Image (cartoon, grey):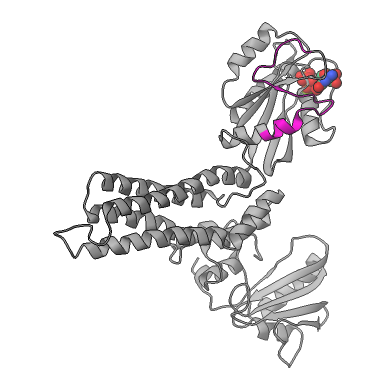
Amino acid sequence: MGALFSTADTIVAVATPPGHSGLGVVRLSGPEAAAIARHLTRRTDPFTPRHATLAVIPEVDQVVVTWFAAPHSYTGEDVIEMSGHGSPWLLQAIVERACQAGARLAQPGEFTLRAHLNGRLDLIQAEAVADLIEAVTPLQARVALDQLEGTLTGLVRSIDAQLFDLVAKLEASLDFPDEGFHFITRTNATTDLAQVRDALTRLVEDGRRGRLIREGRMVVIAGRPNVGKSSLFNALVGTNRAIVTPLAGTTRDVLTEQLDVCGVPITLVDTAGLRASGDLIEEEGVRRAVQAREVAALTLLVLDASQPLSLDDEELLREVAGPRLVIANKADLERQWPEGSALAVSATTGAGLDTLRTAIVVALSGSSSSEDWRDPPRVSNLRHVQQVERALVAVERSLEELRQGATEELVLAELADARAALESLSAPRTPDDLLQHIFSRFCIGK
Ligand SMILES: Nc1nc2c(ncn2[C@@H]2O[C@H](COP(=O)(O)OP(=O)(O)OP(=O)(O)O)[C@@H](O)[C@H]2O)c(=O)[nH]1
Ligand SMILES: [Mg+2]
């Protein structure tokens, strides 16, 4: 732990993924980085900053060395990147030689931690680096990139600046105890704070969608046998992953696939048709289907539009309460009942699937409208959402105090809390345990 927060030594790690690849990169950061690289390549001349230099590490590999001189580097320290051939053995050999020459193996996230400690990235940006690396959908990557580029930081700063302005005026008023609210009227303070509240409210709303995009959700397909659950599963996944037959009771196991639904990473689950069959295997399948429904964020309850609704269907509609979408499948055939609020789709022709995709993300986000899902939300990380919420609660309390005619002191106490929440987002003074927590989810070499 101690070593993690010291930036006095030089750290080294392979920065590319394990396995064989065209290129592999070893990264060094710290005061000895350039000297160690020279030692490894038997070079007497210094490297030229930001120039790619072909060099040889005797008996190991040919490498291209790039030196980023402090402070113009990712970490803000001297950084050396050595690109070699992407063999795990060769890269490991380079790391070992670097360690023999005085470097220390980097811990997960330690390069980015140093970038943060050296003021190159605030905490929001550092966390965005991990999100960017882990992104599995284009929208996830876009949200993380925006944060890395400082969109959220800038927004939080501007909200905090508005609060600071108000705090300054209220504090100055404290020197005029007789009059009270000397430098700003209650009405103006209320107007300013209402603006801040609205900006924070929009961010919290953004956060609901942002978390959905960042975290993903599990969606389970359920319904009676033969209604076309597996066909729908295949249609959404885009491959014939599940077996489809005209026989009721085809699917017994629980099948899962990962897919991108309007930018949200979804784990889609296909399950056995729900019925009492007396068949041992099928009953186990039904038990697992019920279990899957219990952990899923959303159930797609599939009904067959080409068959009259049975008592079993009615029962299922009562039983599957929770968050759900009712789907009238086989809408390409003659319909036997009016869909009402059910979504008409055809798993075989693909009709209605786009509407269904939108309906899934809208239902998961709990929003009432199908806002433009391609529009990247500005906040997505739970820690960030929580701090914005904390700031919002404090601002709402301060508005209430103003309304009730409270003194400047009371209003100021709430505003201090709001500002502390906002500051903890970009966090120049983050407690070590929070840093430890945040950076432990990084991979080694980042
Ligand atoms: N016309 C039409 N047929 C469909 C549609 N969806 C599924 N089917 C047919 O319905 C039959 C059952 O489809 P499955 O996808 O296996 O149904 P399931 O709900 O998974 O069935 P179990 O696994 O037995 O519970 C197959 O013959 C499919 O070709 C559809 O949208 N239109
Ligand atoms: Mg099936």
The image quadrant of residue 10 is: bottom right
Q: Residue 177 sits in which quadrant?
A: bottom left
Is 294 colored magenta in this rendering? no
Above or below: residue 76 compared with residue 191: below
- Please tell me which residue is depicted at 82% across the width and 16% down the height of the picture: 333
Task: Measuring from the top left, give residue 187's x and y in whole percent.
Answer: 29, 51
Above or below for 294 versus 206: above
In the rendered view, does 13 fall on the left or right side of 198?
right
Magenta stretch containing residue 338, yes or no? yes
Pick whichever, 22 or 323, lies toward us: 323
> Does the magenta stretch mainly form a helix, a strand or a loop?
loop
Q: Is residue 233 visible?
A: yes
**Which residue occupies the foreground of this view, 361 or 198?**
198
Q: Which residues are drawn in magenta?
A: 335-358
Quarter of the render that holds ligand 1: top right
Q: Position of residue 288 (x, y in %)?
A: 67, 24
